Amino acid sequence: MAKFDLTPAGSAVLLSHEGKRYIVTAAHVLDLYEGRPYFIGTDSTWVQLPGSFRAINPPAGGREADVYDFAFAPVSEEYARGLEGCEFLTAAHIGTRDTLVFDGAHRSKYVAFGYPLNRLELKRGSHQTTTNNLAFISNIAPRAKYTKAKLDPRSHILLEFDASAVMGPKGAGPAPMVAGLSGGGIFRVPGLERRGDLSPARLSAITIEHRAADKLMVGVRIDVVLEGIGRDTRR
């Protein structure tokens, strides 16, 4: 790939788990440009991703039918040190086996975070890039929507997301483009559920799909991702 000839693909999350470091993303992000190198942006440069990502083989319907759709790559401590300004989330920042609340004022609330494709600014003259992120706050979807989507709350987080009507800095209106959030983190925020709760936000899921017709953002729970990493480690 020519220098600074960058095509945005998606987002990723960095994890520190059981003494090892991992990069996690949505598997379909890696399928976009098969055979081409991938890079992760740091505070000062772009660092090529390792080529040893593990992912479940897609079902008969292809990756679009894959309801798990995650991939991960173990990276060395030396590689991790080269990701200037990037933080690997530890167990203190990861929420596993959390109890979901589907109804009432205290129902589970989340922030989804990632890097939309249309927000990468490439300045060829100065050889600089700017990667602007996007975050949105939402409630967990009702149980009825899980049933309709044929997904289990033990393995997935469904967020209410009506792209035609969101509240932003300028009031109600259509959401920005969200293509590229796949692979980014979905964090549960206790302080949004109960006044005065100072518990830190914790990573709950990895974004894998926007189901616009159902007004849902879909994430695979971090429990499922860590289970996949564990199985791979035990081989």
Image (cartoon, rainbow, N blue to C red):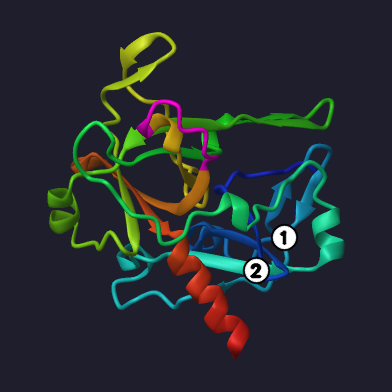
Q: Position of residue 143 (x, y in %)?
A: 17, 51
Name which residue type carries label 1.
Answer: Leu
Q: Which residue is mark 1?
A: 49
Q: Position of residue 80 (x, y in %)?
A: 80, 58
Q: Point out the frontmost of discs 2 and 1.
A: 2
Using a 10 Å C-alpha cutoff, classify the residue at mark 2 as few (fewer than 14 neighbours), some (14 to 19) or many (20 or more).
some
Name which residue type carries label 2.
Answer: Ala
**In what element is the residue under mark 1?**
loop
Please tell me whether residue 131 belongs to the stretch shown in magenta: no
Please tell me whether residue 194 belongs to the stretch shown in magenta: yes
Q: Which quadrant of the view contains residue 37?
A: bottom right
Q: Position of residue 54 (x, y in %)?
A: 57, 74
Residues at circles 2 and 1 in contact by the CB criterion of under 8 Å: yes
Work out which quarter of the rendered image holds the N terminus and state it: bottom right
Q: Main secondary structure of the magenta part?
A: loop
Name above or below for residue 61 compared with residue 162: below
Q: Which quadrant of the view contains residue 213?
A: top left
**In what element is the residue under mark 2?**
strand
Q: Is residue 63 left or right of residue 43?
A: left
Q: Residue placed at 48% from the left, 64% from the top?
A: 70
Q: Which residues are drawn in magenta?
A: 193-201
Q: Which residue is mark 2?
A: 73
Q: Which quadrant of the view contains residue 14?
A: bottom right
